[in-house]
Image (cartoon, rainbow, N blue to C red):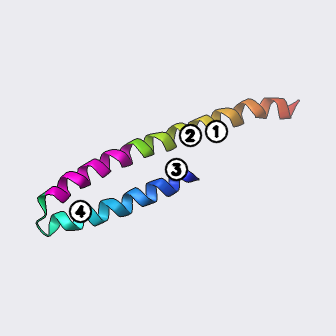
Amino acid sequence: MSLVNDLELEVENFKREYEKFERGNKSAGTRARKVLQDIKKTCQEIRVSIQGAKKEEEKAEPAAAD
């Protein structure tokens, strides 16, 4: 569940930086883009985690059927 919490924090951070950017702070735009890159990485980690859990579940199912 930690990855989901990380994602939530990153999204909040992005919102803060993007609001600053909209008010004219150009450096906040750079920080917002960096946070978006971090969000992308976290999302990929979550996708891999979900896929791994699905594969583990599929391996366990045939044994449970016996």
Residue 3 has which mark? Answer: 3
Give the distance between the C-alpha atoms of the residues marked 1 and 4, in whole angstroms. 34 Å
Residues rendered magenta in the picture: 27-40
Q: Amino acid at mark 1?
A: Ala
Mark 2 = which residue? 49
- Count neighbours of disc 3 (C-alpha within 10 A) and say few if under 14, some if 14 to 19, many if 20 or more: few
Residue 53 has which mark? Answer: 1
Looking at the image, is 4 positioned above or below residue 47?
below
Give the mark nearer the N terminus: 3 vs 4.
3
Which of the image's four quarters has the C terminus?
Answer: top right
Mark 4 = which residue? 18
- Count neighbours of disc 1 (C-alpha within 10 A) and say few if under 14, some if 14 to 19, many if 20 or more: few
Q: Main secondary structure of the magenta part?
A: helix
Do callouts 3 and 2 mark residues in contact (Cβ within 8 Å)? yes
Q: Amino acid at mark 4?
A: Tyr
Give the distance between the C-alpha atoms of the residues marked 2 and 1, in whole angstroms. 6 Å
- Count neighbours of disc 2 (C-alpha within 10 A) and say few if under 14, some if 14 to 19, many if 20 or more: few
